[in-house]
Amino acid sequence: MKKQLSRFIPMVMVAVALVASAASAAPATSAQYKITFIRLWTKKTHPFEYPEPGLLTGPHLSGLIGATTAGGYEIYKVGTPPTPGLERLSEEGKHSPLDQEIKNAIAAGKAGALFETGPIRDASKTETVNVTVTTRFPMVSAVAMVAPSPDWFAGVADVNLMEGGKWVSKKTVDLFAYDSGGDDGNTYKAPDKDTNPKKPTTLANTPHFVIKGERPPVARLVFTKM
Ligand SMILES: [Ca+2]
Ligand SMILES: [Ca+2]
């Protein structure tokens, strides 16, 4: 009897310790956020060679496309050439085949979820999408084409919605312009000039985006916890 009891007590203590740590340390394993996609790129903020208005050819941001991540999968990476999906997104604004690259990352356990919005043609309008982040994939990466352009896009990588062990209630991040490295054109409406081999992605350094030494953001994302 005494022998059985001595074995029983440590097991109870382990169980109590596990319950206590789960109750005190663990946040909800998932959280839903509304993402509001805001266009900041206008003739006023970026006057250099700003494109003329036009029904489909006029200045706009393509639909946003993104993924929830854990810091191990990158839609784009400065210093690394673009994937075929990022190249097409940055040159044509198309979500395919980037959407399939993200789905492949999800299937490989490197990303959590895919999300997309429509384009922003009227800069006074916003686009929204809901996304679920998890303790395994608490970050968000997203891109949208700056259009028209040779291969320029707005991007942000690995926005962490968990801070200090808690889901943030609201977070705002600015997106800057990048050059994907897929085309050599250097004006908004430059004819197609495919880069081969592809160049590494960089921050966009032309006068379109560097204005008096400043780099005004081209878009903004607001994350609001539901
Ligand atoms: Ca380029
Ligand atoms: Ca290209």
Image (spheres, rainbow, N blue to C red):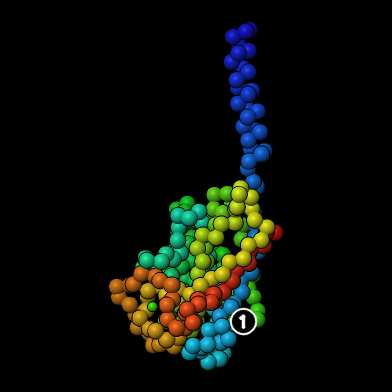
Q: Quadrant of the C terminus?
A: bottom right
For the point 64% across and 50% down, which residue is it?
A: 166
- Farthest residue in the front direction? 213
Q: Is residue 221 visible?
A: yes
x and y percentages locating residue 58 in the rendered image: 54, 88
For the point 61% across and 74% down, which residue is it?
A: 38
- Farthest residue in the right direction? 226
Q: Is residue 200 above or below residue 16?
A: below
For the point 42% across and 77% down, which residue is it?
A: 205
- Reading the image, the residue beneath label 1 is 123
- Farthest residue in the top direction? 1
Q: Is residue 90 visible?
A: no
The amino acid on which the numbered mark 1 sits, given as a three-letter code, is: Ala
Q: Is residue 222 left or right of residue 110?
A: right
x and y percentages locating residue 15 in the rendered image: 63, 27
x and y percentages locating residue 130 in the rendered image: 64, 63
